[in-house]
């Protein structure tokens, strides 16, 4: 069960993480194509992606779309994809809450419709914080309106892939039960995840697609 006790220290760390996200908002792309999801019925693995702040593309042009294409080549099982339905806009105070709610509700519904299906959760930039919230990372659950995944469904998450994760700056990490299936990538120079001081590197994650795909494939 997630411990919802809030300390002033946790609030301060959450505030700092949000400030880093504001930096990310000025770095990521500013268009959203609003495409429709591919239809899929009970694939072995569902790749659920929370895109970055105002990131273009369906799953996200910087990480989600190229990663899913790579995963389809690497995974030894069938895969479907789902785009977390949230504004991905830091000017919307409910953005993170809506993201965690939609992602959690999607996993719950898919678990009813496709009981044998497993999940790969992917988050880039603000989307990484959404994934943290769903996994129950304490720093994020101190924020209002966060919807963690029910404990009885945690075992269905076979891999977690995070990119440009703002919580790395303040030492935030996933809860212990998710430590082994999680890979967290930070480009050299990316200030959002604490990799350096070059803002252009926040969109430089092409190098991580195959390492992330092979990691996920090893967990399926």
Image: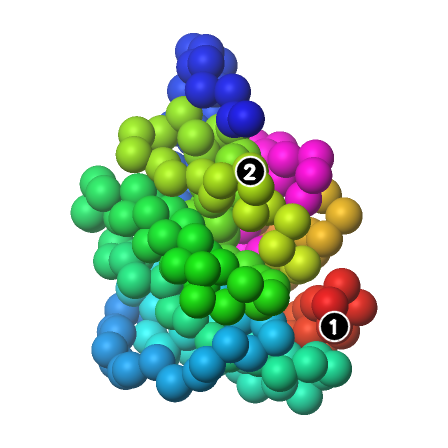
Q: Disc 2 and disc 1: Cα gap in Å?
A: 24 Å
Q: Tell me the residue at 20%/47% (across/down).
A: 91
| Above or below, 151 relative to 37 | above
Task: Indicate which disc, 2 or 1, sits on the residue closer to the N terminus.
Answer: 2
Q: Quadrant of the N terminus?
A: top right
The residue nearer to you, when weighing 39 against 96, is 39
- Reply yes or no: does residue 165 show up in magenta: yes
Q: Would you say 177 lies left or right of 138 here?
A: right
Q: Badge 1 is on which residue?
A: 217
Residue 193, horizontal then vertical, whole percent: 56, 48
In front of the other: 184 or 3? 3
Could you tell me which quadrant the C terminus lies in?
A: bottom right
Could you say which is closer to the camera, residue 145 or residue 66?
A: 145
Would residue 47 be seen by someone viewing this image from the given angle? no
**Where residue 30 sits: x, y (%)?**
27, 69
User: Label 2, on which residue?
Assistant: 151
Query: Mark on residue 58?
Result: none
At 67% across and 88% down in the image, what residue appears? 73
Question: Which range is magenta?
Answer: 162-178
Q: Nearer the viewer, mark 2 or mark 1?
A: 2
Q: Position of residue 79 (x, y in %)?
A: 57, 80
Helix, strand or loop under label 1? helix
Secondary structure at numbered mark 2: helix
Residue 172 in percent (x, y) is at 59, 35
């Amino acid at each position: 069960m997630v411990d919802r006790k809030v300390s002033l220290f946790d609030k301060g760390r959450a505030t700092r993480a949000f400030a880093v996200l504001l930096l990310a908002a000025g770095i990521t792309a500013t268009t959203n194509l609003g495409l429709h999801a591919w239809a899929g019925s009970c694939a072995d693995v569902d790749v659920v992606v929370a895109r970055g702040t105002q990131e273009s593309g369906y799953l996200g042009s910087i990480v989600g779309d190229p990663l899913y294409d790579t995963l389809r080549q690497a995974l030894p099982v069938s895969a479907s994809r789902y785009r977390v339905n949230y504004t991905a806009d830091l000017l919307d105070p409910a953005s993170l809450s809506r993201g965690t709610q939609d992602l959690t509700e999607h996993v719950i519904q898919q678990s009813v419709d496709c009981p044998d299906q497993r999940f790969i959760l992917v988050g880039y930039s603000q989307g990484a914080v959404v994934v943290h919230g769903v996994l129950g990372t304490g720093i994020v659950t101190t924020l209002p309106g966060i919807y963690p995944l029910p404990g009885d469904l945690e075992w269905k998450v076979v891999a977690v892939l995070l990119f440009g994760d703002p919580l790395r700056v303040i030492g935030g990490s996933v809860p212990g039960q998710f430590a082994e299936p999680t890979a967290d990538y930070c480009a050299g120079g990316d200030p959002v995840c604490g990799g350096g001081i070059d803002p252009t590197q926040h969109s430089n994650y092409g190098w991580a697609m195959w390492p992330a795909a092979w990691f996920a494939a090893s967990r399926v």
